[in-house]
Image: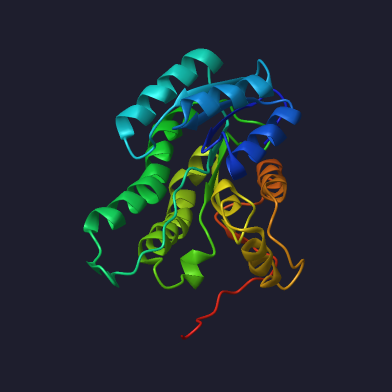
Amino acid sequence: MEINNSAAIITGGVSGLGEAVARTLIDGGARVALLDLNQELGEQVAASLGDRAMFFPVNVSEHKEVDGAIEKIKTAFGTFHIVVNCAGIGGSVRIVGKEGVVSPDWFTNIVDVNLVGTFNLLRATAPVLMENSTNNEGERGVVINTSSVAAFDGQVGQSAYSASKGGIVSMTLTMTREFANNGIRVMTILPGIFETPLLGKLPENVRERLGRQVPFPPRLGKPEEFASLARHIIENPYLNGECIRLDGGLRMGFGRK
């Protein structure tokens, strides 16, 4: 898929991994629509990207909000070719903790944002991608979802997060097969420990200790490295139906206390 003169939709696009993807695609000549919750930050980031970027305040777990944003993007861009799901939330809570059993709302909220939100965007964008003209490969669009190494190496307290990210992995091949005849590729990236706003809240010594767990390079991943892989996926038409770990060889073990 050619990035220049294409249009992209990026959820979670105003910080962290999503913002890095947005800046990479803007540099490649694309127009981008940023979907996120933080309106003030979203407008600032869109302005910093220039007149080829637009921001739309959206809660991805609410399908009506997603549907409404896609209609506005169609009006603004005419169509789009690239869909990148980066919106997500974390959280580590034991099922049975010191204060008792966790509320089921905690589990539902994480799954709604991470897993259902990913589905909501594909559901809203697929009909538009299917109407695109084909390129010389017969391609109409590409979808990149964001899972996590926690889909396979979940830690204590990550039952909801791991389930949500594992669901994204499980959807990848089924989506690939469903949309193959329409010329739409579906890929998933599983990032390891990355420099994101969430980790940025941790003390520096904690962040360094996390980075040293990575075999090589022994540091946290950079959002630009995630964006570089996303760009390669977009531009390489033979990448399809796969889940790629981007983690420096990290495998999370079980630390018994």
The answer to which image quadrant residue 28 occupies is: top right
Quadrant position of the N terminus in the picture? top right
Q: In this view, does 184 lie above or below 90?
A: above
- Work out whether residue 212 or residue 159 is closer to the camera in this orientation and state it: 212
x, y percent for residue 39? 47, 25
Seen at 48% across and 19% down, the residue is 74
- Work out whether residue 59 or residue 146 is closer to the camera in this orientation and state it: 59
Colour option used: rainbow
Q: Is residue 55 left or right of residue 159?
A: right
Seen at 43% across and 47% down, the residue is 178
- Work out whether residue 139 or residue 115 is closer to the camera in this orientation and state it: 115
Q: In this view, does 43 lie to the left or right of 218?
A: left
Most extreme residue toward the bottom is 256
Q: Number of numbered discs present?
A: 0
The answer to which image quadrant residue 235 occupies is: top right
Q: In this view, does 132 lie above or below 185?
A: above
Seen at 54% across and 64% down, the residue is 149
Q: Is residue 57 above or below residue 170?
A: above
Q: Is residue 7 left or right of residue 25?
A: left
Seen at 49% across and 20% down, the residue is 73
The answer to which image quadrant residue 139 occupies is: top right
x, y percent for residue 101? 22, 68
x, y percent for residue 13? 56, 35
x, y percent for residue 35? 49, 30
